[in-house]
Image (cartoon, rainbow, N blue to C red):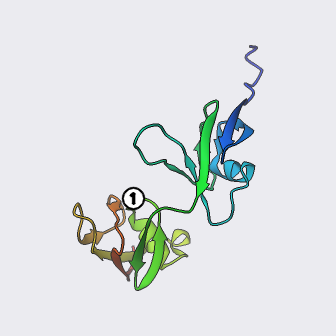
Amino acid sequence: MNTNEQKKPHELRIHIDQQPYHSQTPTTGEALFKLGKVEAGMRLYREVLGDREDPGIENGPEVVQLKEDEHFHSGKPRGVTIIVEGTRHPWDKPVISYVEVVTLFDQTYPQHPETTYSVKYRNGPSQNPEGIMSSGSKPVKVKEGMIFNVSRTGES
């Protein structure tokens, strides 16, 4: 290949909900949702071998590497319900970060990260039954009914 030529994206066959499609790889989660016409409110899962949970694909700009004849399926979101300041929120990831908790409490937080919050949690799993989260702390595992209390502490 001439060094001035750009490598063309590779197209291959995949299956979404048992229907064959052709897609370029790499692609994005958003493109896979559109390609498979995944209904609003549903998730897309990459099928894996063995006794493991099929990982979810986010409907967004994240890059997804595909393999020939790979299979995906749509389904209802899995997860738990967590409670942030008295409001129930569905959560389909095994962990949640400080930024994610604060954004559930204050949707404008990503545009104003200079504001700091105190985050306390309880009713967590055995690995972290209760504790405090702060900016930069590691995400914590979640479980059904886990409670988060969030309060504004000021400007950083």
Q: Does 121 sit left or right of 73 as displayed?
A: left
Picture layout, residue 129 above or below residue 22:
below
The residue at the point 65 percent across, 46 percent down is: 28
On screen, residue 112 above or below 151: above
Is residue 75 visible from the viewing direction of this image? yes
Q: Locate residue 75, reporting x and y percent.
A: 58, 58
SS for dot 1: loop
Q: 25 left or right of 106?
A: right
Where residue 119 appears, as percent x and y from the top left, is 33, 75
Dividing the picture into quadrants, the one containing residue 59 is bottom right
Q: How far across and how far down the image is residue 48, in percent?
A: 49, 40
Q: Quadrant of the C terminus?
A: bottom left
Amino acid beneath label 1: Pro
Q: Residue furthest top?
A: 1
Along the viewing direction, whichever of 39 and 64 lies nearer the viewer: 39
Q: Residue at x 72, y 24 (%)?
A: 7
Residue 95 lies left or right of residue 90; in this view the side is left
Residue at the image point whose x is 60% and y is 40% from the top: 71
Quarter occupied by the N terminus:
top right
Q: Residues within 10 Å of mark 1 (few under 14, many from 20)?
A: few
Image location of residue 40, percent across then percent down: 67, 65
Q: Which residue is mark 1?
A: 94
